[in-house]
Amino acid sequence: MTQTYEDFSKYGKEFVDTGLKSFASLSKGAQAIATESTDYTKKSFEAGAATFEKLLGVKSIEKAVEIQTDYAKQAYEGFVAEATKLGELYAELAKDAYKPFESLVAKAK
């Protein structure tokens, strides 16, 4: 009976420790994602403001269309790159959050 209680206590402690490690990984990953999103938003806003300033000084329709086309192309490429980067960060977050539980899952099998 005492051995069963000690085993249960040991596994409970391991599970709590594993949960805390996982939570730390989640916190770190969420912070990285928030930082990356903030940086992208700032760059995006600055690019839009710079394009708007260029458009204010335009003398012809052709130049305005050229500026808008360049902005749209850069905005799309930036968005695709950012979406890829965020996807990688989310995948890494999930992998890091699960990693502490791998040993418990292996023991359960």
Image (spheres, helix red, strand yellow):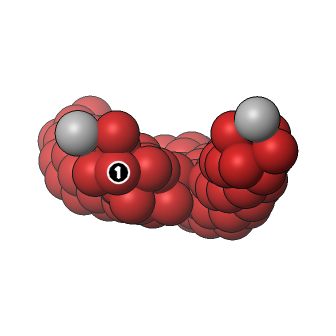
Q: Total number of numbered labels?
A: 1
- Tell me: residue 90, above or below residue 92: above
Residue closer to the observer: 109 or 84: 109
| Residue at x-position 23% and y-position 39% | 109
Q: Position of residue 95 (x, y in %)?
A: 35, 54
In the picture, measured across the screen, residue 93 lies left or right of residue 42, that is: left
In the picture, measured across the screen, residue 88 lies left or right of residue 69, that is: right
- Tell me: residue 25, above or below residue 63: below
| Residue at x-position 81% and y-position 44% | 2
In the picture, measured across the screen, residue 85 lies left or right of residue 39, that is: left
The residue that label 1 is drawn on is 107
Label 1: element kind:
helix
* Residue that extends furthest to the front in the rendered view of this protein: 1
Q: What is the quadrant of the N terminus in the image?
A: top right
| Residue at x-position 34% and y-position 39% | 108
Q: Position of residue 68 (x, y in %)?
A: 30, 41
Residue closer to the observer: 68 or 86: 86
Q: Position of residue 89 (x, y in %)?
A: 40, 57
In the picture, measured across the screen, residue 100 lies left or right of residue 107, that is: right
- Tell me: residue 105, above or below residue 46: above
Give the residue type at disc 1. Answer: Lys
Residue closer to the observer: 45 or 94: 94
Q: Position of residue 23 (x, y in %)?
A: 72, 50
| Residue at x-position 50% and y-position 60% | 100
Q: Is residue 82 visible?
A: no
Q: Is residue 106 visible?
A: yes
Q: Residue 27 sits in which quadrant?
A: bottom right
Q: Residue 43 sits in which quadrant?
A: bottom right
Badge 1 density bin: few <14, some 14–19, many ≥20, Cα 10 Å: few
